[in-house]
Amino acid sequence: MIMKELKIPNAPSAIQKGVPLKMVLDKAAIQQLGENLRHVYKPFDKAAFARDALDGIEPLSITRRSEHIAVILRKHLPGTYSEAIGIMLKSLTPPLEKTEDNGLAVFFYMPHCHYIAKYGIDKKYNNDEDPFDISMHAQYELTKRFSCEFSIRPFIIKDEDRTMKVLYEWMKDANPHVRRLCSEGTRPRLPWAIRIPSFISDPSPAIPILEKLKNDPDLYVRRSVANHIGDMAKDNLKLALTLCDHWLTDASAELKWVIRHALRHPAKKGDSAALKIRKAAK
């Protein structure tokens, strides 16, 4: 019954000329977020939350708006991270049923990602108890609604071994949104996101993920694999070429597309090896 009453505001299917993306997190979105939280947590003061969240938000970009809303969520939810994130998870709408054409409405959950990244790593926000497992579970659920490719990165940077161990399990998940997170979240140079310096220097920890997902049944996931290798090629071209060349053996038509897409930028720059591999992948 609760799920029927939780919702996110309508939004355009794509970025529209003259309408900045930041407008996805506007007054209507903030008020709806307050409504959702109040629905599952009666002490939540939705009016005060909306007032504080809207204060000074107008000039902010969508990323800055998201970060600002996360800070305001911290102010109005219980101070213990585990309790607050539990409330936020209860307020989520049902998982996305498809991987394509979900439009811009999903950006409604961008502040949730920022909340996890900001408050879900340090135990000082969780009564001095390690919040790692709680944050991983939260991102597992949230990425089914809006990709946690941004929020997972601080965890990789701070605690690579534990985070990658989780991602190695998630890459086998039945949900394509979860599988895609494993590739997209580990991209060394993901647009809009903080870079992962260790993966720029040595991308090898992500290779098991790419190997597992290169033949994924969902194009949504395979496209992420291709873009990940495209990132890799900017700093480790030889490794990207070697990986794609190896994949050529008995490659399906779908995997050949991944290879061509992955090496499109070095090919445009005239790299002879990239051109040769892309030609062989036709």
Image (cartoon, rainbow, N blue to C red):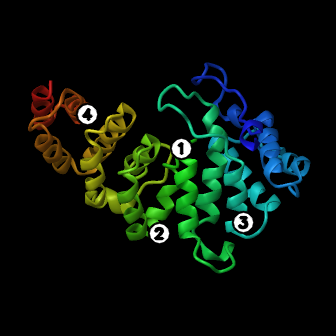
Q: CA distance from mark 3 to mark 1?
A: 21 Å
What is the spatial separation of the Cα atoms under label 4 and label 2, in whole angstroms? 30 Å
Q: Are marks 4 and 1 in contact (CB under 8 Å)?
A: no
Which quarter shows the N terminus?
A: top right
- Pick whichever of labels 1 and 2 is earlier in the sequence: 1
> Mark 4 falls on what kind of element?
helix
Earlier in the chain: of badge 4 and badge 1, it is 1
Specify the label residue 144 is tagged with. 1
First-in-chain label (3 vs 1): 3
The residue type indicated by label 3 comes to Glu
Q: Amino acid at mark 4?
A: Val
How much space separates mark 4 and mark 1, taking CA atoms? 23 Å
Residue 225 in the image: state x and y as whole percent. 32, 41
Which label sits in the foreground, 3 or 2? Answer: 3
Q: Nearer the viewer, residue 90 or 254?
A: 90
The residue beneath circle 3 is: 83
List the residue tagged with mark 2. Answer: 158
Q: Which residue is mark 4?
A: 258
The residues tagged by marks 1 and 2 sit, at their Cα atoms, a distance apart of 24 Å
- The 10 Å Cα crowd at callout 3, few under 14, some 14 to 19, many 20 or more, is few
Say which amino acid is labelled 2.
Lys
Judged left or right of residue 63, residue 255 is left
**Are the residues at dot 3 and dot 2 in contact (C-beta closer than 8 Å)?**
no
Residue 34 higher or lower than 9, as above or below: below
Q: Earlier in the sequence, mark 4 or mark 3?
A: 3
Identify the image quadrant of the C terminus.
Answer: top left
* SS under mark 2: helix
Mark 2 closeness class: few <14, some 14–19, many ≥20 residues within 10 Å: few
Residue at 67% across, 67% down: 82
Q: What number of labels is visible? A: 4
Residue 113 rendering spot, x and y as whole percentages: 60, 52
Q: Position of residue 118 (x, y in %)?
A: 62, 61
